[in-house]
Amino acid sequence: MARVALVTGGTRGIGRAVCIALRDAGYTVAANYHGNDEEAENFKEKTGIDIFKFDVSDFAACEKGVKEIEGAIGPIDVLVNNAGITRDTMFHRMDAESWNAVINTNLNSVFNVSNQVFPGMRERGFGRIISISSVNGQKGQMGQTNYSTAKAGMIGFTKALAQEGAFKNVTVNAIAPGYIGTEMVQAVPEKVLNEKILPFIPVGRLGEPEEVARCVVFLAADDAGFITGSTLSANGGQYMA
Ligand code: CAA
């Protein structure tokens, strides 16, 4: 039987590439999304991957959403915590709404969804939890105190839960992508991107979502059981943690 994977924020950007790569590697994939119905329907039509709408920043919604997925396609073997947003602004201008939105969607979501699937993974003696962190969680980024905090938190979560899962064959890892050519990075002011970011990426370009997806497929594999608590960087050499 094919293993079942859930990818949060799975219908756009990096999540979309992750869903497709896992499907192509033989997984039965569920793509979670929250906001954009039209994009999600397009994604479903093009990829044949089932979509499940719920808000990952809401614990009760995750409880209900994961139950629905498990009822439809079976227990989740691989969870990819990918859903994320930015609300970039300098800290002296940041309001509580921008702070809380990013912490709730990017970090509290990791608790909300992982908490639904981890007990079952332990019981079945197999699981993979992979969280998409960021180079900016490793090095910090001006204009992103909220985002850098959330992404750094994911790495701490990964290291702690890895220790709890290890003896049950549940691995917990993070991936720290650099600047990838998605809508999120396109929102960075062009001048800043060209003058302050691209020159500091040694490979000289943005990454592709597929280059992150292949990291997920690698860590999700049955034979990746000795890799746990790690953070895999895919950032074109921008930062070597
Ligand atoms: N590195 C160095 N300097 C930077 C910078 C950066 N990343 N971003 C901005 N600056 C500089 C600007 O060039 C400017 O300096 P000058 O006046 O000398 O030109 C100064 O800081 C102030 O910048 P702005 O004029 O743009 O001020 P602002 O208040 O309008 O905006 C900002 C500030 C919100 C930080 C905005 O510049 C911005 O959005 N920067 C990009 C932040 C960023 O990198 N976000 C990542 C998004 S992608 C993502 O998050 C995915 C991932 O995981 C990597």
Image (tube, rainbow, N blue to C red):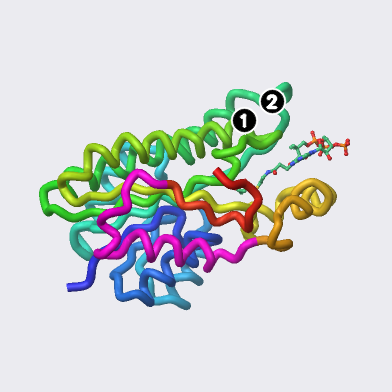
Q: Which structural element holds mark 2? A: helix
Q: Quarter of the image containing the N terminus?
A: bottom left
Residue 34 visible to the viewer: no
Say if the magenta span includes residue 182: no
Which residue is labeled 2 in the image? 91
Residue 139 visible to the viewer: yes
Which SS type dominates the magenta stretch? helix
Q: Residue at x 26, y 43 (%)?
A: 63
Q: Earlier in the sequence, mark 1 or mark 2?
A: 2
Kindly identify the amino acid type of the residue bearing the numbered disc 1: Thr
Query: Residue 33: which quarter of the image?
Result: bottom left
- The number of discs equals 2
Q: Quadrant of ligand 1?
A: top right
Which residue, as the protein is rendered here, is positioned at the far left? 123
Q: Residue at x 55, y 39 (%)?
A: 138
Q: Residue at x 49, y 67 (%)?
A: 17
Which residue is labeled 1 in the image? 145
- Which stretch is magenta? 207-230
- Do tag 1 and tag 2 residues touch (Cβ < 8 Å)? yes
Compared to residue 60, the image places residue 44 above or below, namely below
Residue 224: percent from left, percent from top: 29, 60
Residue 217: percent from left, percent from top: 38, 65
Q: Which structural element holds mark 1? A: helix
Kindly identify the amino acid type of the residue bearing the numbered disc 2: Phe
Report the side of 91 relative to 240 (left or right): right
Report the side of 139 relative to 31 (left or right): right
Cα separation, mark 1 vs mark 2, equals 7 Å
- The tag on residue 8 is none
